Image (spheres, rainbow, N blue to C red):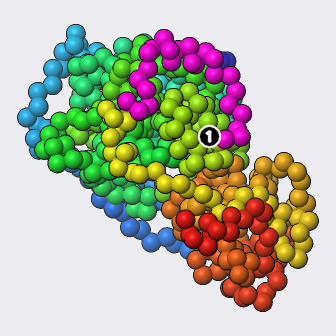
Amino acid sequence: MEVYTTVLNYPFLKIVALPLWILLVLLLLHLDLSHWNGLMGSISHPGLGENGTGSYLSVPSSEIVAYTQGWQRYGYNAWLAERISLFRSLPDLRDPRCEKFKYYDDPDVMKPASIVLIFRNEQLMVLLRTLHSLVVRTPSHLYVELILVNDHSDMDFWKEKLSVFLFETYVLRYIHSKARIIHLNKKVGLIKARNFAANLAKGENLVFVDAQVEFTEGWLVPLLETISEQSLTLATPILDKLDEQNLAYHRSEERLGIYDWSLRRREVPLTKDGRYQLPRPYGVAAVRTSVFAIRTLWFQDLSNFDTELQGFGGAELELSFKVWRSGGRIVQVPCSRVGHLQPTDQDYLRRYGDLYKISKKVTKNLKRIVELWIDDPILKSTIYRYQPHLINISVGDLRESRKLYQQYDCQSFKSFINDVMPELWLMKPLNRTDFAMGNVRPLEHPQICLTVSAESKFVVLEPCKANNTLQNWTLSYLNDLRVVGNICAEVQSNLQLGYNFCHNLGGRQSLHFDEVTNQLVSNTKCLEFGSKVNIFMGFCNAKNKKQKWILDNINLSVMQNGT
């Protein structure tokens, strides 16, 4: 993989010698003049967000546009995120019993790590806050290097070479003087970016971190201690929540991560015995990869299982299967706590590219994972009942991956359930059947079809074409309308019909078909077309012909029974 690293070749600026705040001002001024207000806000409110408290500021009328655009672009209160100090303090929410644990901080036993952060089109202030909290709360002897991999950021601040130069200068001057900052010349996705960084790493251990986290005191030692005790171990902290509205730091309860029959990650309570063992580390079936530690050589070895996975879809599922079923373990470490900013609205994923293209990669990744790792035909058919859109997806070549699977003598999927997540057997698989599949057409104009428009970011009406995947809808058993398996029609704030990644939680993605009136209903409103490019939710009126729709291949018995 070819990469380039920006060369610090602006000697006339003499920026390296500038004080911290002047350099930060230059960073923000180059980003956008409006960000000067954000910087002044953080200075005039020096206690804002301190100790992880929630922050509440009234948005002045002159800043409403910036406030709204921040939410649309990042999926959280980006306007407020710019007004909180880069160096804010955080609470120590560890169990008091953690202080009684003795960690052998011996370099001969606890080998230092290479810390790797992958980012793409991140908000500058949030990324810098992540980096500052990292270096301030991580003893320098516990890591040998900091590797930052920019996965071809191409929006806003990151488009300009001078911006990137200012960022590099700031990092090297005020965060880590020997940080390795690598800029990929094309977008490769999270999976390949991690593998690329792992092959460059000098440390015997790897610690991967997201760009939207904040670290608390003592977070790293328990992770390194855990993987030093048993080499084939992947260790994760408890991910506390950074509130998307006010950036408050909230403690999360210890829970078990497992997968359901659709292979989606779920959180379930610890057993009584599990709660009794706290705050000792405990095994989980499903990993969360926002922050995790692992042996470098082992991660490099595991990375060879499937080199064709793209983007970030399926990264956690595949890593969970690889670790457990090749003889390793995934351990959650309650005495390590890290705050994670995870927007609930997945619209933020647009920063990684067009949702349709992303969804195609996610779907193909999932199909490859199912075909490689689900070896029991009955259990595989159960999963395909929950993910019927995968059945006709081309899986590509899996011969090399299957050879490795056999060489590792990987544990069977049934044994994995029995040994690692027996809770899955309690989730009795149901014979899920979707309500309809095919084109969705207006009754008045049956020659045009509901279509996902990547160009407009909305759902529109276009002439029906055979084999157009963007017109092949499924009205699923979850009462949503989806294409390509992972993209769902979603009602926007202006009531127009847009689309987003499916989240299976209803709300703005909830749609059901009234077979008596032929209306598509979302909550209390009905889908209506005003023109080919104006599809919106209007007040339901059974006499309104513009609210009448034809759905192909309706399973009427299932729809009437509601199963």
Q: Nearer the viewer, residue 182 or 220?
A: 220
Q: Residue at x 61, y 15 (%)?
A: 400
Which quadrant would residue 473 be assigned to in this image?
Answer: bottom right
- The answer to whether residue 379 is visible is yes
Residue name at image x 55 percent, y 56 percent: 432
In the image, the segment drawn in magenta is: 391-415
Taking the image as shown, residue 472 lies to the left or right of residue 241, namely right
Q: Secondary structure at mark 1?
A: helix
**Picture coordinates of residue 387, whole percent (x, y):** 59, 47
Residue identifier under label 1? 362
- Is residue 406 rendered magenta in the image? yes
Is residue 373 rendered to the left or right of residue 253?
Answer: right
Please name the residue shown 60% across and 21% down the image. Answer: 307
Q: Which residue corresponds to the image point at 22% horizontal and 19% vertical from the top-left?
A: 229
Q: Quadrant of the N terminus?
A: top right
| Residue 275 belongs to magenta span | no
Query: 380 or 408, which is in the foreground?
Result: 380
Q: Is 271 situated above or below 511? A: above
Identify residue type, mark 1.
Val
